[in-house]
Image (cartoon, helix red, strand yellow):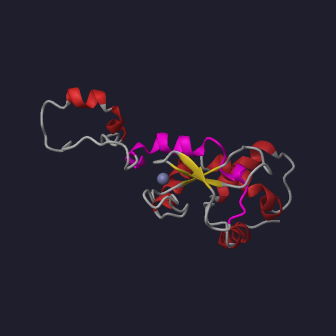
């Protein structure tokens, strides 16, 4: 039989493997809930199932409320690297080019350049561990983390002067509304 301690230390070991830094730690109860839904005859230890399955559950986890918050903390720690463009260096997000296991390795997405790049680390993680819709969901959830537009996009000069007739200018430069998304 599996014990919570065994499973918890297995997860620590698994997450500590070089190249697995992008993965977040899933709570045991989330994993158990997932298996209750799909596997009626689940009698093996979690770790037997988890080794190939962690990524599959992970893609679900990071779309959940707890998971997306967990990923926000990793994003803010730059666990997912930064945009390789020297002029950008925006914090990046992991993405899967496909939701099907075995199709592609994980890529990183720069939310400022809106482009995809190869990770610099030697991660071998499958892109399906993150999935195709995670980055979109993440940025929809955390609108205040959306980066400013690229530096080479014309910016509104003196936007912070408190002038009261900016309406005509903002209409023609709607790109700046991206940077003003945080309202609270
Ligand atoms: Zn970039």
Q: Residue at x 70, y 48 (%)?
A: 33
Give percent across and percent down for residue 103: 78, 48
Magenta span includes 72: no
Residue 170, image x, y percentages = 26, 31
Residue located 32% across and 42% down the image: 154
Please tell me how many numbered marks the rendered image carries: 0
Residue 9 image point, x, y percent: 69, 72
| Residue bounds of the magenta highlight | 123-149
Work out which quarter of the rendered image holds the N terminus and state it. bottom right
* Side of 178 relative to 125 (left or right): left
Q: Nearer the viewer, residue 116 or 2?
A: 116
147 magenta-colored: yes
Residue 72 in view in this figure: yes
In the picture provided, is 175 more to the left or to the right than 126? left
The residue shown at (72%, 44%) is 98
Look at the picture and state if 70 lies above or below 142: below
* Foreground of the two, 3 or 156: 156
Q: Is residue 175 left or right of residue 10?
A: left
Between residue 113 and residue 142, name the one nearer to us.
Answer: 113
112 with respect to 151 (left or right): right
Quadrant, the C terminus: top left
Evaluate whether residue 32 shows in this view.
no
Q: Position of residue 118 (x, y in %)?
A: 63, 57
| Residue 171 occupies quadrant | top left
């Amino acid at each position: 039989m599996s014990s919570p301690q065994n499973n918890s230390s297995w997860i620590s070991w698994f997450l500590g493997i070089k190249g697995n830094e992008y993965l977040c730690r899933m709570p045991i109860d989330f994993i158990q809930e997932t298996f209750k839904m799909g596997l009626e005859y689940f009698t093996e230890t979690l770790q037997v199932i988890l080794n190939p399955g962690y990524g599959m559950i992970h893609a679900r986890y990071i779309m959940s409320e707890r998971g997306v918050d967990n990923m926000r903390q990793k994003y803010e720690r730059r666990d997912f690297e930064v945009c390789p463009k020297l002029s950008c260096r925006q914090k990046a997000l992991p993405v899967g080019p496909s939701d099907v296991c075995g199709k592609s390795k994980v890529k990183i997405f720069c939310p400022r350049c809106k482009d995809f790049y190869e990770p610099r680390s030697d991660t071998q993680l499958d892109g399906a561990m993150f999935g195709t819709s995670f980055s979109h969901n993440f940025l929809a959830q955390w609108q205040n983390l959306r980066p400013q537009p690229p530096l080479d996009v014309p910016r509104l000069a003196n936007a912070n002067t408190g002038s009261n007739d900016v309406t005509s200018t903002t209409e023609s430069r709607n790109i700046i509304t991206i940077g003003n998304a945080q309202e609270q």
